Image (cartoon, helix red, strand yellow):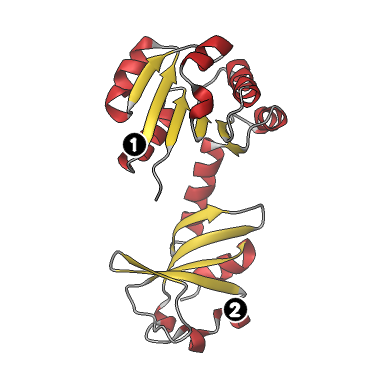
Amino acid sequence: MKKQNFAVIGLGRFGVSVAQELNDAGHDVMGLDISEDRVEDAEEFVTHALVADSTEEEALKSVGIRNFDCVIVAIGNDMQSSILTVLLLKELGVEKVIAKALNKHHGKVLEKVGADWIIYPERDMGQRVARQLLSPNVLNFIELSQDYNIEEIKIPLSMTNKSLRDLDLRAKYNVSAIAIVRNGDIIISPSPDQVIRREDILVVIGNREDLNHFSNLS
């Protein structure tokens, strides 16, 4: 994966968590926050940590914010600062801005001022917990749209030692296998002759309703 430059604005729990994951993945990460204490706490998780007011245009310019591949606005409960920060980032020419929203109305405003991707951490976590409670075979999922997901699913016992051709997932369940996770390795675009093993994890894409049905097979 190509090394990228990220900036995370707002170093609360969510912002630090994002920054740490990006840093651990080998990317350059700059953390910004108006609180000196938060900046000090985050220094071990980022490449650079600076005290700055992201609602001040000159402060953003001084750190060269437009040179970052992506900026994540993870400001906590201050909606006004969050919205103004996103607006300034887009006006300064930042290509990709991801913003944390506190609620649906906040998200709509962030979208109108130019945010490229809105994240609802509490809602998304709630959905993830509920999904895994209702479908224990689902290990992880990515929401592609309102109707479609990519999901990692434990192989139903009835499907072990059969090839993808025999299973015919598309015709029978209206889902498509795009990868197989086997002993930590990933088989991308598995061939129809690939035989599924008991310990395999199947990565499938499809409509949520179809995936829900498929993931609850025994």
Q: Is residue 161 in view?
A: yes
Q: Amino acid at mark 1?
A: Asn
Instruction: Please state the horizontal and vertical placement of residue 134, each as a whole percent of the image.
Output: 51, 58
Q: Is residue 30 above or below residue 187?
A: above
Q: In the displayed structure, would residue 178 be above or below residue 25?
A: below
Q: Going 43% across and 29% down the picture, which residue do you hit?
A: 15
Q: Pointer 2: residues within 10 angstroms few (<14), some, or many (20+)? A: few
Left or right: residue 45 versus residue 5 is left
- Residue 113's spot in the image, x, y percent? 70, 27
Residue at left 66%, top 57%?
A: 147
Could you tell me which residue is drawn at 31 percent across and 40 percent down?
24
Label 2 sits on residue: 170
Q: Is residue 1 above or below residue 41?
A: below
Residue on which disc 1 sits: 23
Residue 17 spot, x, y in % from top left = 38, 34
7 left or right of 81 in image: left
Residue sitting nearer the eye, 212 or 40: 40
Local crowd size for mark 1, using a 10 Å CA cut-off: few (<14), some (14–19), many (≥20):
some
Question: Left or right of 187: which side holds 189?
Answer: right
Q: Earlier in the sequence, mark 1 or mark 2?
A: 1
SS at circle 2: helix
Where in the figure is residue 161, as x and y percent of width and height?
Answer: 37, 86
Mark 1 or 2: the one toward you: 1
Tell me the amino acid under the disc marked 2. Arg
Q: Residue at x 63, y 64 (%)?
A: 209
> Real-space Cα distance between discs 1 and 2?
38 Å
Q: Name the one closer to the observer, 201 or 179.
A: 179
In the picture, the disc for residue 42 is: none
Tell me the SS state at disc 1.
helix
